[in-house]
Amino acid sequence: MSVLCEIRNLSVTYRGQKIPALKGIDLDVIAGERLAIIGESGSGKSTLARAVAGLLPSGSVTSGGMRWSSGHPLQPGRDLGFVFQDPSASLNPVLTIGEQVAEGARRHLGLSWNRAYSRALDMLERVHIPEPDKALKAFPHQLSGGQRQRVAIAAALAAKPGFLIADEATSALDMVVQAEIVSLLDELVREAGMTLLFITHDIALASGFADRVAIFKDGRLVESGPMGAVLATPQEAYTKALIANHRDLSTPPLVREVAS
């Protein structure tokens, strides 16, 4: 296993805030793994995602840092794809689906618009959008919430990045659609050999596909390790409480949905 990113003693404080959102985080991201970051609202997990992606708001104060195996930070859009929590907010309401998915391929792969649209059509097929040729000409408001999130995933992957961050990408969706999106992410990441950072408050949702898990609380990393080991023998009281407060973890969530 090779380390893609070493995070060492990383602390982040937002402008106007006195209490750091992240406090001395030490964590390795392994190339090709699916790493779940779990925690409640305010635990710092989304701040970590934005720090890794270089998307912290201006005025944020950081200390410590990250070291990438490439020797330099990954470029969002080209090397690193980012899927946000709310697809309605991340998609431009006045641009067609085709324009938004094609833009990443055009900008970062140097494709002509015609070839970029072909790439967009292929990506919409890959994320299982019904009638993808028609969806290219549609606007975000004409699609369901689950379909919009699939489009956001297609846009994030249009330039063939090697690293994908999904920041609470399922929390705005109902339970069945959540399972579908997790299954889709798992499929796409496996096929492309990508690294996935999956941010969620739902440890049950991540339990069926993540290789490793890192538990965050109040801006600190309280426990991490292989997903199966952490679920079987959690070491921290907070981790035990998270597991106890979620639905049965003995069967992966995608299987539970089908069975129900």
Image (cartoon, grey):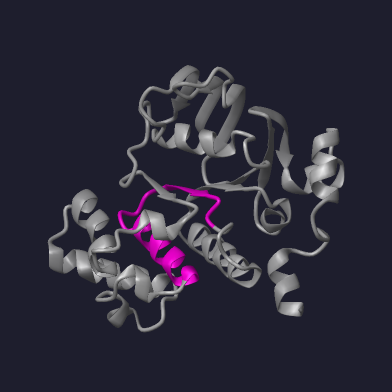
Q: Position of residue 26 (x, y in %)?
A: 61, 24
Question: Does residue 224 belong to the magenta stretch?
Answer: no
Is residue 93 found left or right of 64 in the rendered image? Answer: left
Q: Identify the residue at horizontal 66%, vertical 48% (top origin).
A: 201
Looking at the figure, which quarter contains the C terminus? bottom right
Q: Position of residue 133 (x, y in %)?
A: 28, 81
Is residue 214 found left or right of 116 in the rendered image? Answer: right
The number of numbered discs placed on residues in the rendered structure image is 0
Residue 198 visible: yes
Dividing the picture into quadrants, the one containing residue 236 is: top right
From the viewer's side, name the closer residue of 140 and 233: 140
From the viewer's side, name the closer residue of 154 and 22: 22
Is residue 93 found left or right of 214 in the rendered image? Answer: left
Question: Does residue 167 belong to the magenta stretch?
Answer: yes
Q: Position of residue 179 (x, y in %)?
A: 62, 67
Q: Which residues are magenta?
A: 145-169
Q: Identify the residue at horizontal 52%, vertical 55% (top origin).
A: 169
Q: Identify the residue at horizontal 24%, vertical 76% (top origin).
A: 137
Is residue 228 found left or right of 122 in the rendered image? Answer: right
From the viewer's side, name the closer residue of 11 and 207: 11
> Which residue occupies the extreme front position in the image?
16
Q: Position of residue 89 (x, y in %)?
A: 39, 55
253 over 259 or under it: above or below: above
